[in-house]
Amino acid sequence: MTEFLVKHFIKDYKDVEKVSVRTAYGVLASIVGIFCNVFLFVVKFAVGLILNSVSVTADAFNNLSDAGSSIIGFVGVKMAEKPADADHPFGHGRMEYIAALAVSFLVIEVGFTFLKDSIGKIRTPEAISFSVISVIILLLSIAVKLWLGLFNRKLGEKINSKVMMAVFADSMGDVVTTGATILSLVFFGVTGINVDGIVGVGVALVVMWAGIGIAKDTLEPLIGEAIDPEVYARIKKFVESYDGIEGTHDLIVHNYGPGRSMASIHAEVPNNVDIEKSHEIIDRIERDAGKQLGLFLVIHMDPIETRDKSVLKIREKTAEILKEIDPSCSIHDFRVVHGENQVNLIFDMVIPIEYDEEMRSELPQRLSERLKEVDSRYQCVITVDYDYVAKQDEEK
């Protein structure tokens, strides 16, 4: 069904890097979401009235809020489509994140409202009735929400959409909460014990937790998150694939919405090559990055020594000692300046960003002391840098 809808309603559906195609995906997901959720609201609300069940009614209004979420998502993707202008030179792509954040607040508000209603039901229980037909209708609801969630996840993965992934998470929460509602009705039908209010509290808490999770996921790109390791590796490999580039470091990516990123990176070039030739290579890489990666890339050029064997040997020894001290750290921009009575080793040390100030001071000192044991003339001038790449276990 998903492939059928995509192929029949989205022109050029394979070209997901185009803003117009991304928008078409968002519009399709929103319309399908509105239709499914309004249908489920009507069905569940009717069942809730018949059964006089707060948990079923809570579930119904949760679906209505989901329809509102789809409307917000629709508005968000349409606004994100707006091109860059004088006030927003990087476009309006972050509107999609803001829309997802609005969805999360709506979900939290609905959960909080029904948490209060459920607590009221626990304090003052009301009679409910059991119906096999009602349970069947709710099972149908689970099937619809499960499909809708997987539909949004598939589309969201195709275009890297936070809004769609938020809808997926919300839909999975609905599957859990509706399942809990069914269990409470079945439990009442078998035992005659009314646990509707207690289950309603559970439903409300799950809904609120889903909203908090969505808010957390959408706030990260707005605040500024670490670079995904796969993105880091792809950009690094791309730049280093060009002849005349010896290595790269200090990659930073700024996200202005899905498919709208700006990055800066330091590229190491041999110090014996004519600067105009190296600059021409850098310019070509920046142009190609825009065409092939869809990335606005700014490259800083760092000349490094590639021929002097004595310098290369000192660098290799420095990297070896640092690896013994802390394998998580690395060095770059290594230079050697010979003085009359000392040898200055000037370089940057990259340390994990989670290290505290004590580690930031201790590591350079330990490295300097170890290098002095190799040669008492060595004087280290170390600039501490941070690693902006997300850890593998932090990947979503």
Image: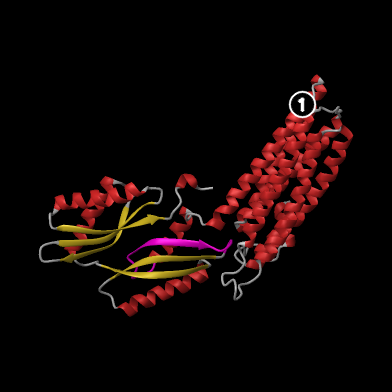
Check residue 251 for magenta coloring: yes
Rendering coords of residue 287 (x, y %): 47, 74
Residue placed at 47% from the left, 56% from the top? 227
- Residue 66 visible in the displayed image: yes
Q: Looking at the image, is 81 positioned above or below residue 326?
A: below
Q: Which residue is mark 1?
A: 195
| Among the 4 quarters of the image, the one containing residue 343 | bottom left
Residue nearest the viewer, comparing 220 with 186? 220
Rendering coords of residue 329 (x, y %): 33, 51
Q: Is residue 210 left or right of residue 242?
A: right
- Residue 321 visible in the displayed image: no
Residue nearest the viewer, comparing 201 with 31? 201
Residue placed at 65% from the left, 63% from the top? 22
Residue nearest the viewer, comparing 204 with 334? 204
Query: In the rendered view, how is the structure colored?
Result: secondary structure
- Count up the numbered dots: 1
Q: Is residue 347 left or right of residue 57?
A: left
Residue nearest the viewer, comparing 54 with 179? 54
Residue placed at 82% from the left, 45% from the top? 41
Residue placed at 85% from the left, 30% from the top? 132
Rendering coords of residue 234 (x, y %): 46, 59
Check residue 248 for magenta coloring: yes
Q: Is residue 14 left or right of residue 268?
A: right
Q: Secondary structure at mark 1?
A: loop
Specify start and end residues of the magenta stretch as a single range. 241-259
Q: Amino acid at mark 1?
A: Val
